[in-house]
Image: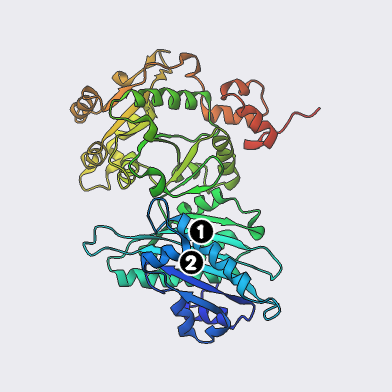
């Protein structure tokens, strides 16, 4: 049954009339856009303990301290604001005076669009809150990217989303996925993008933040999310800013020795490039939403199984809604102009030069190629064994339509597309889909197809439908 959505003023009034909710508002950069909804709704004295806008940088530094990088619109800044204001609440408000109060601290730090309208703006928003007077607080943090072209419109959007966040924390906290959807109540997707979310605390113990990342992409709130080896959600802009990005796309269902050989050999080729600084490289394992939907609706457990292994291998995982590679490269181009690399097999390279995937573009495949290779990009291609001849195929064996052959040859000649020649020929016959079926069927020998320790992880956690043999 669909949730009934009430208006923003109704949400603010509902919170104001709830005598158990009491807290502070601290907003930097875009004025007091959230708290004004509570003042306008009426009965705010029972909810708002303090409202402040530490707008001036010197005053902000005096209250929360100066950041090492000198920035103000950061996750670190937001966490400081939440923690300090929540601590002050507990120190200054007597429990004897408010024995039934559930304290909260709401904060945001935002930079809206600039006058030249080249920088769209972004911000951090969060709420630290109790669900019972004697209970430790929870924390919900999100990062937003603004899409509107007027600062006043962005401020209005921030105000609505802030009310949605506080309302969701207190009234929809039992369903993390529904909490995410509630953030867009009374808002449209073309106004603001949420590209990072993190929930923690005693009431979110069972919440998997990797699944929350998946929901952001699945719901269309953003086109791509990243999480790290510890399963924590990472801000794409923070991770990829001015970096050399090396990406491998796959199903990783499960990750095989071929996948690892591809990334290891491709990484070596990438570092041999004189324009690549090893200390400034980010490696990403990408799974597309289309891949997750390959067998129908997204199976969350199947997604978690893949994530468990990649995280155990110490990898960063990118979940994207970019079925075509040119969209992925364009996305990376928002954060960096440094040299990028894509590692792929021959089948993927063949798809890149298949015109049917670009019929929706006014410029067709040439437009897509322009987006991809106008960036500082190199493509590293892993070989495949020919099913008919048994020979090993490389990019020279690839069949390309005669109309596109000159473009293909040009990119190969100029080193934009390169063969991976240092590979392990003994593992070319390993395919994830076959390994997966053998795991499900409890056949023997699948372990040797996987990287070291991966089989142990699958068995211990019973991933991908693995069942130990009956004794």
Q: State how far apart marks 2 and 1 are (Cα).
A: 9 Å
**How busy is the neighbourhood of tag 1: few (under 14 within 10 Å), some, or many (20 plus)?**
many
**How busy is the neighbourhood of tag 2: few (under 14 within 10 Å), some, or many (20 plus)?**
many
Residue 357 at what x, y percent from top left?
31, 41
Above/below status of 374 relative to 39: above
According to the image, label 2 marks what residue?
Answer: 107
Please give the name of the residue rendered at 53% of the width and 27% of the height, measured from the top-left corner.
256
Residue 375 at what x, y percent from top left?
25, 38
* Label 2 vs 1, first from the N-terminus: 1
Quadrant in the rendering for residue 363: top left
Q: Residue furthest bottom?
A: 42
Residue 378 versus residue 462: which sits nearer the camera? 378
Image quadrant holding the C terminus, namely: top right
Above/below status of 51 relative to 83: below
Residue 256 versus residue 405: which sits nearer the camera? 256
According to the image, label 1 marks what residue?
Answer: 79
Residue 163 at what x, y percent from top left?
49, 72
Label 2's element?
Answer: strand
Label 1's element?
Answer: helix
Q: In this orientation, does residue 41 appear?
A: yes
Q: In this orientation, does residue 1 appear?
A: no
Please give the name of the residue rendered at 28% of the width and 69% of the height, measured from the top-left corner.
150
Q: Residue furthest right?
A: 471
Q: How many marks?
A: 2
Please give the name of the residue rendered at 62% of the width and 36% of the height, measured from the top-left corner.
464
Mark 2 and mark 1 residues within 8 Å of each other at the beta carbon: no
Image quadrant holding the N terminus, namely: bottom right
Residue 60 at what x, y percent from top left?
42, 65
130 to the left or right of 268: right
Please give the name of the residue rendered at 31% of the width and 48% of the height, measured from the top-left corner.
334
């Amino acid at each position: 049954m669909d949730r009934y959505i009430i208006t923003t003023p109704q949400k603010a009034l509902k919170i104001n009339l709830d005598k158990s909710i009491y807290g502070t508002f601290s907003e930097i950069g875009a004025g007091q856009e959230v708290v004004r909804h509570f003042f306008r709704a009426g009965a705010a004295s029972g909810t708002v303990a303090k409202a402040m806008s530490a707008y001036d940088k010197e005053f902000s530094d005096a209250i929360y301290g100066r950041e090492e990088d000198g920035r103000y619109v950061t996750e670190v800044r937001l966490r400081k604001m939440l923690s300090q204001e929540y601590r002050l609440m507990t120190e200054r408000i007597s429990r004897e005076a408010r024995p039934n109060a559930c304290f909260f601290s709401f904060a945001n730090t935002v930079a809206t669009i600039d006058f030249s309208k080249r920088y769209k703006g972004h911000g951090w928003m969060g709420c630290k809150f109790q669900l019972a007077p004697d209970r430790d607080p929870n924390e919900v943090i999100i990062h937003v990217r603004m899409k509107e072209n007027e600062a006043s419109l962005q401020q209005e959007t921030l105000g609505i989303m802030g009310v949605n966040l506080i309302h969701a924390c207190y009234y929809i906290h039992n369903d993390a996925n529904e909490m995410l959807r509630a953030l867009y109540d009374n808002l449209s997707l073309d106004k603001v993008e949420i590209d990072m979310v993190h929930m923690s605390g005693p009431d979110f113990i069972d919440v998997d933040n990797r699944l929350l990342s998946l929901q952001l992409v699945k719901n269309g709130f953003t086109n791509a999310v990243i999480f790290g080896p510890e399963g924590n959600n990472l801000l794409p802009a923070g991770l990829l800013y001015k970096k050399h990005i090396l990406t491998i796309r796959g199903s990783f269902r499960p990750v095989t020795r071929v996948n690892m050989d591809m990334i290891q050999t491709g990484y070596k080729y990438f570092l041999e490039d004189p324009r690549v600084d090893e200390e400034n490289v980010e490696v990403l394992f990408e799974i597309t939403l289309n891949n997750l939907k390959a067998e129908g609706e997204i199976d969350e457990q199947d997604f978690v199984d893949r994530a468990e292994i990649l995280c155990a291998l110490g990898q960063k995982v990118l979940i994207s809604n970019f079925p075509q590679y040119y969209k992925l490269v364009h996305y990376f181009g928002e954060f960096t102009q440094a040299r990028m690399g894509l590692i792929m097999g021959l089948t993927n390279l063949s798809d890149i030069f298949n015109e049917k995937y670009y019929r929706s573009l006014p410029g067709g495949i040439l437009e897509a190629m322009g987006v991809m290779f106008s960036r500082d990009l190199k493509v590293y291609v892993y070989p495949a064994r020919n099913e008919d001849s048994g020979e090993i195929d490389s990019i020279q064996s690839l069949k390309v339509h005669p109309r596109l052959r000159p473009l293909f040859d040009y990119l190969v000649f100029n080193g934009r597309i390169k063969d991976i020649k240092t590979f392990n020929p003994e593992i070319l016959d390993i395919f994830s889909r076959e390994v997966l079926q053998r795991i499900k069927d409890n056949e023997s020998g699948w372990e040797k197809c996987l990287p070291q320790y991966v089989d142990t992880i699958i068995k211990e956690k019973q991933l991908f439908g693995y069942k130990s043999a009956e004794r």
